[in-house]
Image: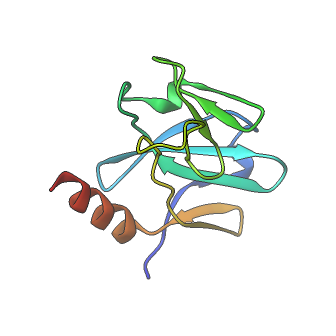
């Protein structure tokens, strides 16, 4: 598995979603808590840039329709099919690492 960095953990502000592209796929990376990070698909059904939303009580709130996603899992409060895909990641030497192949494979299967 060949992981790539999406940024330095220490540069991410707590509860501030950040838009990142990997393999031309929009992601939202959020640091919450002291050592917790979430890497989710960055688009919901209503809005192309979920990272423009805000975090409140570990909930990512989409700026368009106020859809609410649990920041740690991407699951909507409704628990329906609008969940944001959560991607695996690891923090190593202060870098947040993701697997570009996992992201690419998921996105290609989603587009079919």
Image quarter of the N terminus: bottom left
Furthest-right residue in this view: 34
User: Residue 40: image x %, image y %?
Assistant: 50, 49
Q: In the visual, does 100 lie left or right of 96?
A: left
111 above or below 65?
below
Furthest-left residue in this view: 112
**12 or 16: nearer the eye?**
16
Q: In the visual, does 98 lie left or right of 32?
A: left
Disc count in the image? 0
Q: Quadrant of residue 78?
A: top right
14 above or below 99?
above
Q: Quadrant of residue 99?
A: bottom left
**16 or 50: nearer the eye?**
50
Q: In the visual, does 43 lie left or right of 78?
A: left
Image quarter of the C terminus: bottom left
Q: Residue at left 31%, top 56%?
A: 23
Furthest-bottom residue in this view: 1
**5 or 82: nearer the eye?**
82
Q: Residue at left 54%, top 20%?
A: 66
- For the rendered model, the colour scheme is rainbow
User: Residue 22: image x %, image y %?
Assistant: 38, 54
User: Residue 90: image x %, image y %?
Assistant: 63, 68
11 above or below 96?
above
Q: Quadrant of residue 77?
A: top right
């Amino acid at each position: 598995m060949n992981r790539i960095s999406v940024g330095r953990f220490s540069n991410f502000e707590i509860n501030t979603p950040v838009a990142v592209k990997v393999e031309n796929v929009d992601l939202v990376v959020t640091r919450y808590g002291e050592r917790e990070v979430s890497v989710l698909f960055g688009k919901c059904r209503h809005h192309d840039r979920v990272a423009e939303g805000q975090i409140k009580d570990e909930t990512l709130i989409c700026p368009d329709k106020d859809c609410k996603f649990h920041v740690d899992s991407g699951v909507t409060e409704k628990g329906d099919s609008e969940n944001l895909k959560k991607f695996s990641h690891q923090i190593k030497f202060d870098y947040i690492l993701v697997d570009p192949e996992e992201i690419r494979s998921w996105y290609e299967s989603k587009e079919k």
